[in-house]
Image: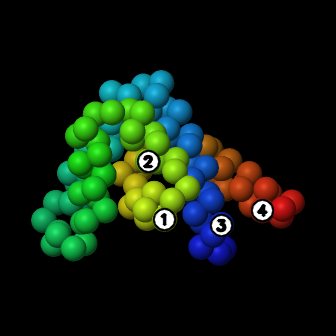
Amino acid sequence: MTHEMLDQIQLAQHKLIAKKLQENPETILALAQRNLRRYIGNRPAPATSLWREWRTLLEENSIDRIVAVMTAKTQKATELRQASPFAGALTQDEIAGTIHREKKRARTC
């Protein structure tokens, strides 16, 4: 699988997470914040820079801004999605579905 395909899959998954975030912000934000606390832990700062950016973004508590960043098609947004704090927000079926749809879409392009 190419990096471009992985980026497309991550974007599709984050669009789905963004929908869940808008529908149930407290639950999804709490999940992301718990994950970030666990991820950052005692790791050295250089290893956690993207997670720290996520933490700052989540602390702003602006759902619209979080959604905009998660679903942007910029290089920075792609980097942030690679260090996503939203593990556990999607079910295994949702993850598999996005992978299947993106692979299928790539074959038809």
Asked whether the beta carbons under mark 2 and mark 1 sit within 8 Å of each other, the answer is no
Quadrant where the C terminus sits is: bottom right
Crowding at mark 3 (Cα within 10 Å: few <14, some 14-19, many 20+)? some
The reply to whether residue 80 is visible in this rendering is yes
Q: Is residue 33 left or right of residue 27?
A: left
Residue 76: quadrant of the picture: bottom left
Amino acid type of disc 2?
A: Val
Could you tell which of marks 4 and 2 lies nearer the N-terminus? 2
Amino acid type of disc 4?
A: Ala
Q: CA distance from mark 1 to mark 3?
A: 15 Å
Which residue was labeled with disc 4? 106
Amino acid type of disc 3?
A: Met
Asked whether the beta carbons under mark 4 and mark 1 sit within 8 Å of each other, the answer is no
* Extreme-right residue of the structure: 108
Residue 31: quadrant of the picture: top left
Could you tell which of marks 4 and 1 lies nearer the N-terminus? 1
The reply to whether residue 95 is visible in this rendering is no
Q: Position of residue 84 (x, y in %)?
A: 40, 55
Considering only vertical position in the picture, is 88 above or below 6? above
Residue that appears at 16% across and 60% down: 41
Asked whether the beta carbons under mark 4 and mark 3 sit within 8 Å of each other, the answer is yes
Q: Secondary structure at mark 3?
A: helix
Which residue was labeled with disc 2? 69
Which residue was labeled with disc 1? 75
Q: CA distance from mark 2 to mark 1?
A: 11 Å
Tell which tag, 4 or 1, sits nearer the viewer.
1
Q: Position of residue 88 (x, y in %)?
A: 43, 45
Q: CA distance from mark 4 to mark 1?
A: 20 Å
Q: Secondary structure at mark 1?
A: helix
Which residue was labeled with disc 3? 5
Q: CA distance from mark 3 to mark 2?
A: 19 Å
Residue that appears at 48% across and 24% down: 23
